[in-house]
Each structure stands twice: as structure tokens, then as C-alpha cells.
Amino acid sequence: LKCANPGARISVKLVSEVGVGVIAAGVAKAKADHILISGHDGGTGAAQWGGIKSTGLPWELGLAETHQTLVMNDLRSRVILETDGQLKTGQDVVKAIILGAEECGFSTAPLVSLGCIMMRKCHLNVCPVGVATQDPELRKKFKGMPEHVVNFMWMIGEEVREHMASIGIRTINELVGRTDLLKYDESTRNEKTKGLDLTPILQHALSLKGLINPNADVRNTTKQDHELEKHIDMTTILPAAQNALKHKTPVVIDAEIINTQRSCATILSHEISKAHGAEGLPDDTITLNLTGSAGQSAAAFMTRGVTMIVRGDSNDGTAKGLCGGKIVVVPDERNLSRGFKGEDNIITGNVACYGATSGKAFFRGVAGERFCVRNSGALVIAEGCGDHGLEYMTGGRVVILGEVGKNFSAGMSGGIAWCYDPKGELRYKVNFAEPVRDFERLSGDAYEQELSEYLEEYAKSTGSPVAQRIIDNWEEEKMHFVQVFPLDYKRARKQAADADSWKGKDSMPKAQVEIEADTGASKQAKTPDEKEVATKFNKLRGFVEIERKPEPYREPKERASDWGEIYTPVKAHDVERKRQSARCMDCGTPFCQTHSGCPIHNLMPEWNELVFKENWKGALDRLLTTNNFPEFTGRVCPAPCEGACVAGLVAAPVTIKNIEYSIVDRGFKEGWIKPRIPKERTGLSVAVVGSGPAGLAAADEMNQMGHKVTVFERDSRPGGLLMYGIPNMKLDKRVVQRRIALLQEEGIDFICNVAVGTDVTADQLKSKYDAVLLSVGSTTPRDLPIPGRDVKNVHFAMEFLGKMQKALFNQNPALMDNCISFRTPFKGNKDWKVTPDGTYIDVAGKNVVVIGGGDTGTDCTATSLRHGCKTLVNLELMDKPPEERDDVANAWPAYPRIFRTDYGQEEVKDRDGADPRKYAVMTKRFIDDGAGNIKAIEIINLKVARDANGKPTIEEVPGSEQIIPCDVCILAMGFLGPEESLASGFGVETTKQTNIKAVHGSNGDGFATSQKGIFAAGDCRRGQSLVVWAINEGQRAADAVNKYLLESRAEDAARAVRDGVQSGRSAMGGRRGVHTSAGTEPPRKP
């Protein structure tokens, strides 16, 4: 490398690992100028996660060991030491310098500052932010600027200076190796690190035992002496080649060479490249006639214009990186005269022609192992090779006129090779683990002519009797050649020659007309079917080439007249879902799975890939791995995962919600979702208070853990918010009841019409069950205490929606029978019927005002419209959201706060011609009609702004008061928390927001209240939120309850042994035995 560019600094990269210091010492003795110690963190490209996350050690360990070893052997002054591996702050830099580094490498952080999102598709040319791609459309997405990197590095430098100033250091040189300035932060000690001794890496290098030089330098102070002046190029070749270098005059140089003279012609090639650029000199301008044994790396990086003829042999690495030159290696004529046969003997060492890009290399004899590895453009001919020949070859031509070793052509993806195989043994030497190559005989085409010409040139250059014999008997001998042709390369060449080949577009080509020459009649080609159209695209570019097509809602006029689901019947087998799944980019860092995207960390890329492969059963298995109830979230979740989708940065996001809906409904349709009855029971019991999404998720998880779970619900049917708070048109209640029935069959008991705290006391639950989980939701509605609040016909949203759903149940009792067999899609969407019977709040023919936005406000809007309200107005306190995401205040991957028109507003707009929402208004008072009924509402416009902290501020606009007619007002302004009586009944602490006080956690931590054995999860703990967050809470709370139960049982058993009490029922305080059969108690029907 130093010969290839004498002015360059030669760097060697070493992975931080035990013993890296010894390796570094050897590298320094081998005269490297620079050593990089790379930590186990990092990696922004195409490497596998195993290679990124499981290779090496932290850079701190490797750097400290390397620095100490180099100082101990008095080698530190010769080299510059650098480290890298997720360095992001000035403090990281200061620590690295203290541990011995003079330089620090940054890669990930500057890339992120330029807009990199760690997609890790750098090698596929599909970078969605335009960082690592040559695609012109994707490059338009690049928003990075040089100033971004400059600013980042400037801030790193400022922070470094601040830290250095704080410890009294003025220059980097003063700081190198000063480990006395670094100490361990004892406050971070924990159970795992309490025995960790960091003294060895914090020991000053000059205090080590065994120092060769007690006054050794601890940083780089000198340069390596590479002794290039003694090189054969400098002493013999360059002086004789001056005319050729300056005037392109052909010269012939004769010289003796021995095997200690390495990299012959490499410095010469460097001088040619400096003077004449990449084109070099005309062919054969400089001819080197060398006699003897060429040392390692002879002709390495040899450029065009140089021809090297070696009469003798050559060592390892011959023609490494060959880039235009020509090398011929033939046996010494003296040996040939004694009967020496080149075809039977090794004439060049291992790794010959490694990484050659152009030029020619002819070997009259057998080459060693790893011959032509990564050849990408050179013509190479030899009379045999060792193991692993042509590995990872990507281009060029290779002819082997003899036997090859094992693992031949493994990973070969380009170029063509011809093997002379008269014995038919090649089939036993080839690596068939990767069936990506064709092995075929010559067929008289252009490739046969190409091979013939190569053999003629080889025979002329080397005088090879093997080549001459083949040429003289060509018609017979050509049948013994096997042509090795990579399939992808062969296909690419064919497509390049075929103007009508498929170009990977998103639409099918028009059907072709075939002309029958004998009759003159025409025949129309077969029109491609839907599946053919759907699969003709480039999946890697699916997010660019395929248009986002979510499943639409039913038409507003149709759906607004019934209570069936608003969605179009899903065709889970429809090829459109496969096309949409192909838009998923399988991101290296899938933000859709993070808390910003999906609180339960659904494996979207995995099940999207399985849907694309039409493995619906596998997709369902991956979906159910993380989501207890995808049939709920696929319908009612607002899909924050789509807001965090990486594809949304450059195009429309993937239709994740629709695909999830399709997968789970396909699962029910095919009968794949069945009750999962635990094989064993722990004998421990849990009471779950509340059967909303959090309670159901927790019950499902704990039941599968083997605990006996009983769910208490104060309404007549379990389901909580899912059953009574979400309208039927968004979530058909048969879907909810189907899941309840499955849970019952799995062994969960549901006890309905029981209000915990009234019908059953907290003490009764605590005495009967081993643990209690409160998941009652946030049920106290936010009121609007303004003048006139005592008028009639002002209702809370849950009262309005709940009574409506109960009326649907009462008037359609048969629909809720045998729901475990219910399947969607279903033929009729109009099977739910309701007529006014006085049991629900009927707003038909009335002026309705809904105060409050969000999903609840939309649900109230849609329900009022189905009643047949006269007018509808929806009031919202905040200003209208922007049409597009604010990249500063609402940066990706946060859920985009943008203007949306949901199903309710769409239906009102279709009927009345205008969106019902009024933004930035405040309700001032309710106006009655003199008889105690509401008649109108007075509102006033607001000026909404943001303070310095980004919090919204509101200010009334004087003179903007309005009166809105109102016969019924529905308050949909959210919830304050659980009912106070529940918390006081269990004696648990609450927060300022009146929620039950318990922290969120994972891995069995969190969710415990102030009372032992009492846990809380869902909206009653975190406040009103999404269904998917409730499922997350239920899952994590189940882990916490399980950990508590098992630890309590272990403590009881230990106490029993300590006190001499027999374990079992007495030790467990009368609890059930450790193991009971599943489902011993029949499930109770709600």
C-alpha cells in the first residue's frame, strides 16, 4: 500500500477485542502509520445485526489495551492511534484521548445530521432520504447540507474545549494517555457492576511493569521509516524508465529479481498515474523482463502501459489490484530444458489477481489458493488453481486450463469463466450451495469465439504447450470446456440485448399481437390476469413505484343510513394487499415498531413480508406474537405506526392498519384462531376489575401464564369501552363478543353486573384473590361548568353512546348469539336495526352541538347523523391543524398533528355540504327556552398562540360572540380519571390528575400501587389514551402481577421451611395447590 501511494498514510483497522494490543504491536512493527481501534457499537450500512451488535468489545477496552501495549514496547511514538464506535459527544472524545487516542472517528452522528434515518439499505440503492443512492428520484429527497455537519462538529469541538478547560488542559497532546484524570462514577454501581474493577484500563501506561523504555513517548512523535529508497522500483526500474514516463517512449528493462523484493512495479505504477492519470501509458510502453522469483505482491496495482514478464515464478498476491497492466509468468527456460512441466507445478502463490479491475495476467502453470477472488474486470488465464478459486468474482474473464480446487466459484456474481475439464471432475469441485450459476458446454456462439481468441493470445505470450494442443485440436477439445456463467449476469446481458424485456415498471406492458407467417392471421396474446399485474414490480422500490391504496370506507350515503361497520368488506386474499405490503421497506431501524409508532411493538416489517409472500398463516403468527387483539386495533386504532413509517418521509406510508385488519380477519375466516387452553395452572388467582382493552389484555396474558383469572364488569356485557364506548359502525360488537367467547373457552371467568366497591368490596377481593388488577378506565367525564349548565338535554358523550349501544343490543338480541362463529367480511352491513323506543337519547330532527373533538367527538357526530338530526355543529377549542406536518414542532416520527376528515365529518359534509367543525371557539353559556330546556349556545372566537415553551395560549377575540341554535348538546371533552370511590375503597394513592398512582414499567416492574398486591393499568393509571396503549398497559401489568405472585409464593415457601411449617395449603394460607388442570371451573357466561 505504501508503494501504491508513498505520500499516503497507511492505516490498519482493528476490532476492539481481547489481545488486540499484541496485534497492534505487530502492525506497528510492520510499519503502519495509523491504527484504528473500532468498537463493537456502530454500523450504519448493510451489515447484519449480528455483525453490528455481536462483534468485538467496547472501544474503551481495546483502546486502553492497545495504547498500553504500544507504550510498553516503545512503539507508541511511531503510530497515530484512532478510535471509533458510536462517538457522539465531546465527552466521548475527551475520554478517548485520555485512554490513548489522538484521533476520533465519527460516522453515524454526522450521517444523522445530514438526514440519515438508519434505514440500513445502503447497498440496495433505495435509501429513502437520498443519502446512499444514485436513484435520481430518491436523491431529490436529500435535504442535508454541509453546514449541518460543520455545525455538529463545531459543537463537538466546543464541548471538548469546555471539558479540557475544566480540568486545566490546553492541548490535545497534553491530554493523550492521562488516565489519572479519569475515574469511575461510583454512583452508577449496581448489582451487576459492583464487582467490576476498572483499574487495569485506568492505569497509566508508563507505570506498567516490563517497560522497554521508561522514558517512552505516549503519543506519536516520529514517522515510520518505510525504506522505500531501497525498493527495486527506486533503485533499478524508475531510473531506466524516465523517458517512458516523460515522453511515452517505449523502453525495455531487464533485471534480476529475488523473493524479498516485494511489490515490484507498484511504485512505478504510482508515478505513471501521477503523471498521466487513470489512462496510464499506451500498452507495452514499459516492458520489464525479470528473471528469478518475484516477491509478494509483484505487479500489485500495476497500471496500463506496463508489461511484466517473469521467467521463474512469483509469490503470494501477484497482480493484486491489477488495473490495466499485463503480467506474464512462465517457467525459467533452464528448467524447461530439463523437462519441467508448468501445467503440473505451482507457478504463482495464493491470492493472485485479488481484486483485479482490468488488465491481463497469464500464468503458464498452476496458481495457488483463492485465485482471482473478487476479480472485477481482468482477463486471467492459468493452467489450474487451488481451493476457493474465483470466489466473489464480479466481472472480467478467467480461463482455467487444468484442474481446480474445492469450493470453486463460490459467490461468483459476474464475469465468465471457462474451465478445461476433460475428466468431468468440475462438478465435484463447485460450490452448489448457492445455485446462482450456469454450467454449460460451448455452443458455437460469440462466447466460443471469445475463448478461442483468448487462447491464441495466451499461447503466443507464454508458449504454453497445453494451450497450443487445444488450439490445434479445437473441434475436439472445445467439447471439454465448461462455461461458468452467473445467472444474474447472464440475465442482465440478455435483457440489455432485448429491447422488449421487462423494465420493472408498475404497470403491465400492453398485450402483444403475434403474426403467424404461414397464414398471415393474427392472434391476440393472453391478457395478463390480476395476479400477474400485481406481481410485476420491483419490490425494493415498491414504496416509490406502487401507489398507496388503503381500503376505502363505504360510500357516505350508504353507510350513514345503517349501523353496520363503515369499512368495505375486506378481501384478505386480494392481491392488492400483497401489493401494498410490498411498499414496506423492511427498514433496518423500523420506527413503526417504536413507542412513537406502536406501543405494543407490532412486527410490521415481518408480517408485511409474509403477506407479500402470501404466507397468511405465518403473518398471523407474527401478528399475534405482540398483539392480543388485532381485530380491535385493526379497526379503531388511529395508526400512529403509519405516522412513524419511514416510507412516509418520501411518499405515502404503508397501509399497515389495513394489512393488520386483513391478516386477523383472514385468520378467523380460515379457522386459524382457536382457544389456547393452558396445559398447567399455577394455583394462583387474580381478580381483574374492568373489562376494557387493558383488562382483557392483562387477563389474556395472565391466563396463559397459568393463573386463574376472574374479570369483574359492572355493565351487563364485558368489553368496557370496546363494547359500550366505541360505536357499532366502527367496531361491530360481534367482533368483541367473539373475543370474549374465546377468552371464556380458555378458562377466564367473567362476572358482570357487579360494581366493585358497591356490590363487592375491596376487602372481599383482596381476601379471596392473590392479586387484584384495577383496569377500570378513565370514567369521570370532563364537565363544562359555565352559566346555564343546569339546563336539560346536555349529555356526556359516554351516556349518549352507551345508551345507543344498549338499544342496539336490546332490539337485536339474536345477533349476539354464537358470536364465536362470527366471520368478517360479511355479506350484509345492514343487519343491525333500531327504532325509537325511549331507551336512548334520540336526536332525530334536532339541532345538535358536539363540544370537543377527537375520536369521541367524531363518534357522537356520526351517531347523531344516523338518528337524523336536523343540524350538527362540532366545536373545538384549538385552532385548525395544518394540512402538512410541522417539521419543527411536530417532527417525524411523532404522530402527525395534521388536519384530517374522519368518517363522521365526511358523512355530515356529504349530507349538509360543509364540514361541521368550528375551530378556535369557546363556549360561554348555555341558553334555555324558558322551560329549562337548552335552546342555544353562545360561543366566542379565540386567538390561539404558543408560548416560549411551545404550550398553547388562548385569548378571546372581542366582539366575535355568536349564538348557535341547539336542542341537544353532547359534551365530548375527554375524561379526568377513574371514579374517586374506587381508589378510596382500595386505599390506593392517586395523582394530581386523580389517576391511580403507579409507575409504568417492563420486564415485571411497575404498575404496583401503594397497596401490596393491588395493581393498576390502562386509562385509570395513565389517563385517557388509545386502545393500543391500553393493550400495552395490560401486557406489562400482567408481567408485574406474575412476578409478584411467583415471588410471593417463593417467600411463603421459604418462610414455611424456616418456621418448620409443612408446605402446601397451610404454607400458602389456604390457597389452591401449585398445579391444577386447566379449565377445572366452568366459565361463567356474562
Image (cartoon, grey):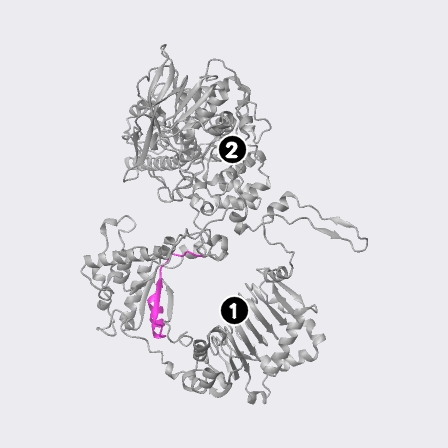
Q: Residue at x 49, y 40 (%)?
A: 656
| Magenta-drawn segment | 19-45
Q: Is residue 283 above or below residue 377?
A: below
Say which amino acid is labelled 2. Answer: Pro
Q: Which residue was labeled with disc 1?
A: 373
The reply to whether the magenta stretch includes residue 31 is yes
Say which amino acid is labelled 1. Answer: Val
**Whole-percent x, y for residue 710 in the image:** 42, 27
- Relative to 1055, is 277 on the left or the right? right
Distance Cα–Cα, label 1 vs label 2:
56 Å
Q: Residue furthest left?
A: 168
Between residue 221 and residue 1009, name the one nearer to us.
221
Q: Residue at x 42, y 45 (%)?
A: 591
Q: Which residue was labeled with disc 2?
A: 675
**Secondary structure under badge 1?**
loop
**Whole-percent x, y for residue 429 in the image:** 59, 67
Q: Is residue 607 above or below residue 1028?
A: below
